Image (spheres, grey):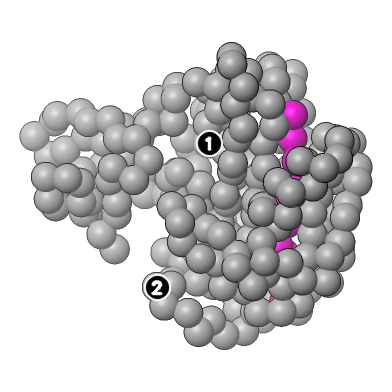
Amino acid sequence: MIIGSNILFFRDLPSTNSHASLLLKKNSLTEGTIIHTNYQSAGKGYAGNSWESEDGKNLLISIILYPSFIKPSYQFCISMAISLGICDFIRRFIPYCSIKWPNDIYINDDKIAGILIENTIMADHIEHSIAGIGLNINQKKFISSAPNPVSLMQITGRTYDLSACLSELTKDLDIRYKQLVAGNTESVKKEYITKLYRLNKWSLFRDANGEFTGRIINVGDYGALMIENQNKEFREYAFKEVEFIL
């Protein structure tokens, strides 16, 4: 096992990603080390957003990886593999989930998990990656301004053992990461695309030019989202260049 071979638990932290970064500056940590906490006072989400999580109710972890075999230009493969691993875990309990590009995990139109991957690149290789995951498990009520959070408990009506959930999640993530180690990035990408939220469905988007109707058709090698509009024009978008209007 790579992911989960070493787990460091802290009762509370400002942010698991930030703490993982601090530890890496002081120590050499085994690949796959997980920083785990019950509560984050300053949890970080994608694009500078915060992450709400009630104390002791959800999974809050960061994974330290050394994917030097992946070229920096293909670093989105890490995001795809982590996203698929979370989906594998969720499907242990419910039969459906999707990935809202680039890496939010959705149940129908509600967000159950978020991912924040921070890569440190030196010259022509990735020195290390910190993959932060917030996965809503037992939270009953969300009070932040986030528009559509949901937890596994809200969906199924069951309460879950967080230690058991962490064990199963690490197994699923480990399998997906080993696909990258083995060089199976193309199969990871193909499966990631099949699980995209609203794939091939006409939806309303907003970009720098305003609102438009389009449909997601693909993801490029470097992670760009490919959308076809109603005039049969194809556009590629990097992160933060386009958003869904729900």
Q: Is residue 109 left or right of residue 202?
A: right
Badge nearest the viewer, 1 or 2 = 2
Left or right: where does residue 242 sit relative to residue 33? Answer: left
* Dominant SS type (magenta): strand
Q: Is residue 172 visible?
A: no
From the image, tell me which residue sits under label 1: 192
Mark 1: secondary structure: helix
Is 69 covered by the magenta stretch? no
Please give the residue where the numbered disc 2 appears in the rendered image. 147
Q: Quadrant of the C terminus?
A: bottom left
Q: Quadrant of residue 81?
A: top right
- Amino acid type at circle 1 is Tyr
| Magenta-highlighted residues | 57-66
Q: Quadrant of residue 41?
A: bottom right
Regarding residue 204, the answer to whether it shows in the image is yes
Q: What residue is rendered at 83% in x and 71% in y? A: 11
Residue 53 versus residue 159: which sits nearer the camera? 53
**First-in-chain label (1 vs 2):** 2
Instruction: Give the quarter of the image for residue 67.
Output: top right
Q: CA distance from mark 1 to mark 2?
A: 24 Å
Task: Identify whether 223 is placed above or below 133.
Answer: above
Q: Residues within 10 Å of mark 2 (few under 14, many from 20)?
A: few
Kindly state the secondary structure of the residue where label 2 is placed: loop
Up/down of 76 relative to 155, above or below: above
Q: Position of residue 19 (x, y in %)?
A: 73, 55
The image position of residue 148, as x and y in percent, is 43, 71
Q: Is residue 52 above or below residue 73?
A: below
In this view, which residue lies farthest toward the left?
A: 231
Give, as a three-letter code, the residue at label 2: Pro
- Residue in view at x 91 percent, y 46 percent: 6
- For the residue pair 99 and 11, the one nearer the viewer reads as 11
